[in-house]
Image: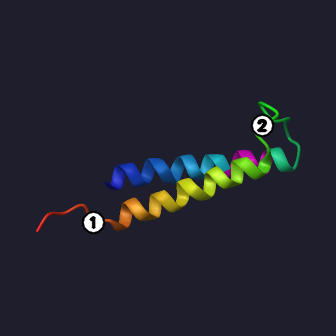
Amino acid sequence: MGTFALVLGLLGALSAVMGILTTIEVFPPLHPAFTWELLFSIAAILLLGSIASKGSGGGYD
């Protein structure tokens, strides 16, 4: 599950960076629906998912 957590964390970080770049208007949004609020929401969900999947342990007793 560590690899899955890593992938979720990287996607969350990339989404946060895209949100920041959209906020400071480095480039326009790719689609009108992709506002900085949506990108930060997606980043938060992905980063929380990363924490949850890393903390699950994944072992059987």
Which secondary structure is most common in the magenta stretch?
Answer: helix
Residue found farthest to the top: 31
Picture quarter with the N terminus? bottom left
Q: How many marks?
A: 2
Point out the tag, 2 or 1, that comes first from the N-terminus.
Answer: 2
Q: Position of residue 8 (x, y in %)?
A: 48, 50
Answer whether residue 24 is magenta in the image: no
Q: Which residues are magenta?
A: 16-21
- Residue drawn at point x = 36 percent, y = 68 percent: 55
Label 2 sits on what residue type? Ala
Which numbered dot is residue 33?
2
Q: Position of residue 26 (x, y in %)?
A: 86, 41
Are the two marked residues, 2 and 1, in contact with CB atoms closer than 8 angstroms?
no
- Above or below residue 29? Residue 11 is below
Q: Residues within 10 Å of mark 1 (few under 14, many from 20)?
A: few
> Where is mark 1, residue-wise?
57
Label 1 sits on what residue type? Gly
- Residue drawn at point x = 78 percent, y = 30 percent: 31
Secondary structure found at label 2: loop
- The way the protein has been coloured in the rendering is rainbow
- Residue drawn at point x = 27 percent, y = 66 percent: 57
- Above or below residue 59? Residue 25 is above
Q: Position of residue 29 (x, y in %)?
A: 81, 35
Picture quarter with the C terminus? bottom left
Which numbered dot is residue 24?
none
Spatial CA span between label 2 and label 1: 36 Å
